[in-house]
Structure formats: structure tokens, C-alpha cells
Amino acid sequence: MEKRKETVESGSGSRFPDGFRILQGKQEFITYMEHSSIRVWPSDVASHFDQHTHSAIEIILPHRGVSVYHLPNETYSVNAGEVLIIPSGQSHALTENRDTQRYLLLFEPNPLMSLRDIPSISPLMQQPLYLHDNSELQDQVNDLLMQLVNCYFQREPMWNTQCYSYLLQMYALLGRHYLQATAPQQYAGRRSIDPAIMNSAVTYINEHYMDDISLEQVAVFAGFSKYYFSRVFKQFSGMSFLDFLTNKRLNVASDLLVRTNQSIREIAASSGFGSMATFNRVFRERKNCTPTQYRAIYSTVLGPNTGRAIF
């Protein structure tokens, strides 16, 4: 018997073996089990997913056949033993034939971004990463991800934290290789950036995002002029100060919308947005829906304000 082809049309929701896909236009909203922010979907059926985006980082691990990813400017044919990492917010489509077997990993980057040295590899995390050269690095990453998969399905106590520990090890490996390859060229002929100072600036932002902080204020904290700090912060984190601060506030707001009973106005204030108008505008620009719609979308498959998926 021919295996069924799984598709999800825009604007719909579909049940899978351990959860749901929910699409609003081209935006997908990932649901997770209680007390977790990672999901592993195995599949051995033909499938096609149209172009979509989501806040989760996506990793494909084929162990038979080929998983074909279509991105706006490139197509990746990912074979067994290879790894493709799709960054948060990257538009992509996926096609697999009936001979393909794979694991698809989805996880929220928020827990990683709170670490002080992660911003130094932000450029690495903002682009697709394709490991396919049979290198030692590819083998190490594959091994860590398969340990994550085994941990996910064993469901032992603290499994979500254990799964993230494998992701941390993976990004430590990838980050070291990235920095060793790019740092000499990136900073050649420039004044050296002290990582400790930049990490302190990131910590300051993470601790004061709910306040009315400015580029000038953080630059003074770091001991630089605002112009110099603006330049080196982008070199260090891969994004502007304003984008970094906005992403932090949106991540906090998104979590509060799903996990709490707070009103939209309370969430806007506690996540650092100065007005409801600004909060609604920025949220719609970055999430492709309003805060109210975002909460409603998740409430269709989550227990009321608990973040618990109903299966």
C-alpha cells in the first residue's frame, strides 16, 4: 500500500503523531509538550510542506533517502548522515519521497540566546548551516543530535534540559570552528573587541530590557561612545543594538502570551514596550500576526495559559 502524503495547507492545522502544525498564512506556530520547548518529529512517509517560517530553529537528520529544502536563494538536498540547520525566521519548503526516513528537530532559541557568549556567533546562527563534507565536525554534531533524539523519546526526568545540553554542546563545537575561521579576518586592522565587555553589555540588556534603555545608556555602561559601541556591538552580535533589544522584548512577550493570564497591555509593559501601539506594530511586523491573534492561535491546542499541548 502506498504511504500517505502529508501536506498542510495555509491557514489550517494538522495533527501529527505527537503534536500539531498550525499555519496562519506562511507563518507556522510550533506547539510543544508541557514544560518543554523542543520537539522531534520522525517520518518515513512522503511529505511536502509549502514555503513557511517559524520562530523555532529547525534541524533535519535524514537516515535514509533525501530531504530537499527549498530556500529563497538556494536548494539543499540533504542525504543520510548529513545535517542542515535552518535558522529562526528563515522561509523554507520541504519535500521528501516515500523512501525517506528522517528526524526533524524543532526548538526555540530563547534559552540559548540568554548565554553571554552566544551573541559572538550570531552571524552563524542567522544563516543556514549545511554539514555534508564527512568531516569530524559533521560526525560530532550528528552524534550529539542522535543522543538528543534518544533522550527525547526516553522521556526521563529533566529530559528537556538534557536535550538542550546536547544543543549547547553542538553550538559550542560549531562556534569554536566558526570563530577560529572568521575572527582573524573579521577583526584584522581593527581595535580589538574585549569579549568580557561585550558580554557584560549583553547581560545588561537582558537584565534591563523592561526599562526604557537606550543605545547611549548601554554604551556608557560599556565605556564607549555610542557610535563606536553601535559598530562593535553589531560586529559582536551580528545585529544592531535596536534589533537585539527588540528581539529580546518580543521573545519575552511571546512567552508571556502563551504561559500567563496577563492582559495584552500588562505584557506590553512588562516586556519593555512603551506603548500598546508600538507593541502591536512591532509584533505584527516580526510575527505576522497581532499579540491577540498569537494568543488565540496557541489557545486552540494548548491548555488554558499553561503551555500544555492537548493530545
Image (spheres, helix red, strand yellow):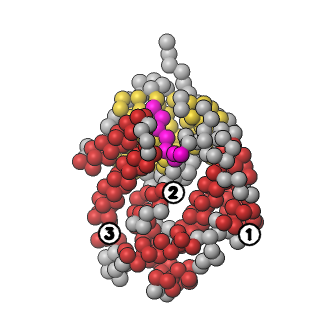
Foreground mark, 3 or 2, reads 2
Q: Furthest-front residue in view?
A: 157
Query: Can you say whether 88 is above or below 269 in the image?
Result: above
Q: CA distance from mark 2 to mark 1?
A: 24 Å
Q: What's under tag 3, amino acid-wise?
A: Ala
x 41%, y 46%: residue: 163
Cα distance in 3D space between marks 3 and 1: 40 Å
Residue type (three-letter) at the residue carrying disc 1: Ser
Name the residue tied to disc 3: 183
Q: Which mark is residue 267?
A: none
Provide residue 143's location: percent of width, then percent of height.
30, 42
**For marks 3 and 1 on the same chain, the one whose residue lies earlier in the sequence:** 3
Q: Is residue 160 above or below residue 253?
A: above
Q: Could you say which disc has been placed on residue 110 in the image?
A: 2
Q: Secondary structure at mark 1?
A: loop
Label 2 Cα neighbours within 10 Å, binned few <14 / some 14-19 / many ≥20: some
**Residue stretch in magenta:** 35-42
Q: Are marks 2 and 1 in contact (CB under 8 Å)?
A: no
Magenta stretch: dominant SS? strand
Sequence order check: which comes first, mark 2 or mark 1? 2
Q: Position of residue 294 (x, y in %)?
A: 68, 50
